[in-house]
Structure formats: structure tokens, C-alpha cells
Image: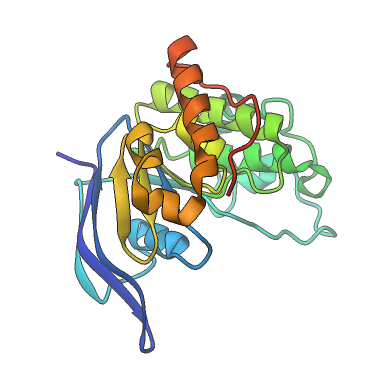
Amino acid sequence: MSLIDLHNIAVRFGGHTVLHDVDFGIDRGEIVTIVGPNGSGKSTLLRVVIGAQKPASGSVTRSRGLRIGYVPQQLHIDPTLPLTVRRFLDLPARIPDAKAAEALEQAGAGALGQRQMADLSGGQFQRVLLARAILSDPDLLILDEPTQGLDQPGSAAFYRRIARLRADLNCAVLMVSHELHVVMAASDRVICLNGHVCCAGAPEHVASAPEYRALFGTGTQGALALYRHDHAHSHDHPHSHGPEAAE
């Protein structure tokens, strides 16, 4: 059984339909990425999956006891607030030191426990948010534009870590990304969204779909070339070197 299944989902705000006719499921162990232009409903769809947004119609079926970890697109913390990474992980409920240390280590933030949150770089901050998301040992890890503000090497390293976590935790990963070159290398399945599911499937299938080309242009052949190169050399540890795909 899928971890989660969405059937015929529609979301409306006022008289405006943001999403309609959305169907997809996620199985354990998959990395699924949602791509689409600004305003296409990507973040709204994540909120439906999490349970923070009730659809106007359609159904969401979650496996019993489904645990979800979530890395938000942005999290603003008052820079004048004295808050260490370790204390941040204790919010809202205190956790054992061993559990915190394990999560930080898995997220690549093992040395940051006593650092002030306000002093972290963008990449360090994202790894700490990732550590917090995996504290619950999630079945499904959800990430909304997790590498926003990181440079390309930083983004590539973050996505490689996500791939390792997927294997270590035996979880599924659902993420939103605008980095087409990374998506093609790091995902098992891509969902192209523009108010509805335009096309979906393996990265190579989606990259060649007319609906995808209409949204992102033919420059995405660069992403497809990177996808082929990376999977030919290392299926387990994708990299994202080379020119970025045109958006």
C-alpha cells in the first residue's frame, strides 16, 4: 500500500481554484519531486499532503500511523534571540541528547549543536532544519524548496545527503524544487504541476513531455543530459555538475 494517496484533489481560495484533478501516490523508498512555475500550486499541494490544508473536494488516504517530517521553505528566527542549535531541537518538546546528536549527525550538522542559530550559514541552517525533521524517524520526509539560497555545489551536496537519508531511514521523500538540473539527477519520479498534474513519471519521460517543454522550454535537454550522465555513473550518489538547465 502507498504511504499516501491523493485522489481527485481540488483546492479553492475564495472563488479561485488553485488545484484541480490532482491524483498521485507515494510509496516507501521513493524520491518524488514536484516542479512547476510560480503560482502553480506546489506549496498548496504540500500542505494538503501534510494535512494543513483541507481540499475542497477529493480524498487523501494515509497509511495508518504515518509519520511525516517537514523542512519548510523558510523559517524566520529573531536574530537577537539566544538560541543554540541543541535548544532549537528541543522545541516544542524536549528530546534525549543521544537522539538529538544522532539526528544532527545524519543531517551533516554534527558539529553545530552548541552554535547559535543566528550565526549559522544558509547551508548549516538547512541541515539543522533537516535534523529537526528526521527526529520523528519519518516515513515520509517533505521538503519545500530546501536549497533556496544555496549555491550549486551546496545544493548538490544537500540532495546527495537526502538520497543517503532515504536509504538510512527507509523513508519516502517528497520535495518541491525549481532546480531542474538537480531534479532530473536526484528524483525517481517527477510531477509537473500547473494547477493540475500536467505530466508525471520517470525524469527522462517528463523531460521529453510536450507539457513540460511548454512550461520550461527546450533548454531542459541540459537537465536530461545530466540525468543520463549521472545515472550511468552512479545511481546511488547523484551529482549535479555542469551547466544549469534553462528555467
Q: Nearer the viewer, residue 240 or 70?
A: 240
Q: Position of residue 234 (x, y in %)?
A: 47, 12
Q: Nearer the viewer, residue 148 or 180?
A: 180
Image check: 219 left or right of 34?
right
Camera sees residue 95: no
Camera sees residue 220: yes
Q: Nearer the viewer, residue 182 or 221?
A: 221
Q: Position of residue 148 (x, y in %)?
A: 65, 48
Query: Residue drawn at (40%, 39%), measured in percent from left and top?
Result: 207
Q: Is residue 27 above or below residue 118?
A: above
Q: Is residue 182 above or below residue 144?
A: above
| Location of residue 86 by image quarter | top right
| Location of residue 182 by image quarter | top right
Query: Residue drawn at (71%, 33%), measured in percent from left and top?
Result: 113
Q: Nearer the viewer, residue 153 or 2?
A: 153
Image check: 43 left or right of 240?
left
Q: Which colour style is shown?
A: rainbow
Q: Position of residue 84 (x, y in %)?
A: 75, 44
Q: Position of residue 188 (x, y in %)?
A: 36, 31
Residue at the outermost top position? 233
